[in-house]
Image (tube, grey):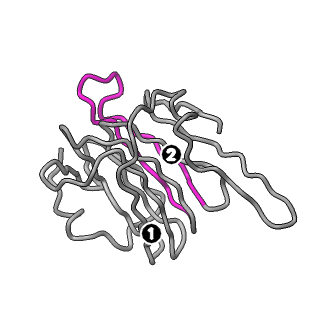
Amino acid sequence: MEFIETALKGAYIITLDPKGDKRGSFTRIFCEKELAEIGFDKKIVQINHSITEEKCTIRGMHYQVGTASEIKIIRVIKGSVYDVIVDMRPDSDTFLKWISNNLSEDSPQILYVPEGFAHGFQTLSKDVEIIYQHSSFYDPNFERGFPYDDSKIGISWPFPVSVVSERDLNHPNL
């Protein structure tokens, strides 16, 4: 695994090292020992799998606060997405700044999202599948979010939006 720190301190793109032979390939997508090199000292308590059928769908922007604040490790296993994270840490030099990355099944990359960040994505293809590893359990009492088009953040999405959930549309602006 190679760790590339992004412009937002503590967030990393992890480049994987697939091994292939005539049988196919093998890729390690999680190694606690290697993640410790970037300060990962939590345990993974929940793994989620999302399936998004339509191209240009947006999921987000989501995060948890307080004792439920979480690290997310995100891997696209089918299709491709425009993935966005926003620094929600008030004491950070990059508070309310965002970055994006294209993640796809064809690219051996994972996104490491530290505690205190919001996350969302827009699908760039149909039938997208993502695996999320979480360091905290989902807790609706600590769940927060804001609309994908919140003007205070100003995220530039690559395509007009085709589908957004009612829940995501009803998050308050920051």
Position of residue 26 measured from the top left corner of the image (x, y, whole percent): 71, 57
**Going from the N terminus, do you reach mark 2 or mark 1 first?**
1
Residue 61 on the magenta segment: no
**Mark 1 sits on what residue?**
56
Residue 111: image tag = 2
Position of residue 122 measured from the top left corner of the image (x, y, whole percent): 44, 61
Residue situated furthest right in the rendering: 22
Q: Nearer the viewer, residue 116 or 90?
A: 116
Give the residues in magenta. Answer: 80-104
Q: Amino acid at mark 1?
A: Cys
Residue 94 on the magenta segment: yes
Residue 141: image tag = none
Which image quadrant for residue 76?
Answer: bottom right
Question: Which type of secondary structure does the marked residue at label 1 adopt?
Answer: loop
Q: Residue at point 51% right, 45% down?
A: 111
Does residue 67 sit above or below 39 in this rendering? below
Left or right, 140 with respect to 50, comes to left
Q: Nearer the viewer, residue 29 or 101?
A: 29
Determine crowd level at label 1: few under 14, some 14-19, many 20+ residues with C-alpha closer than 10 A.
many
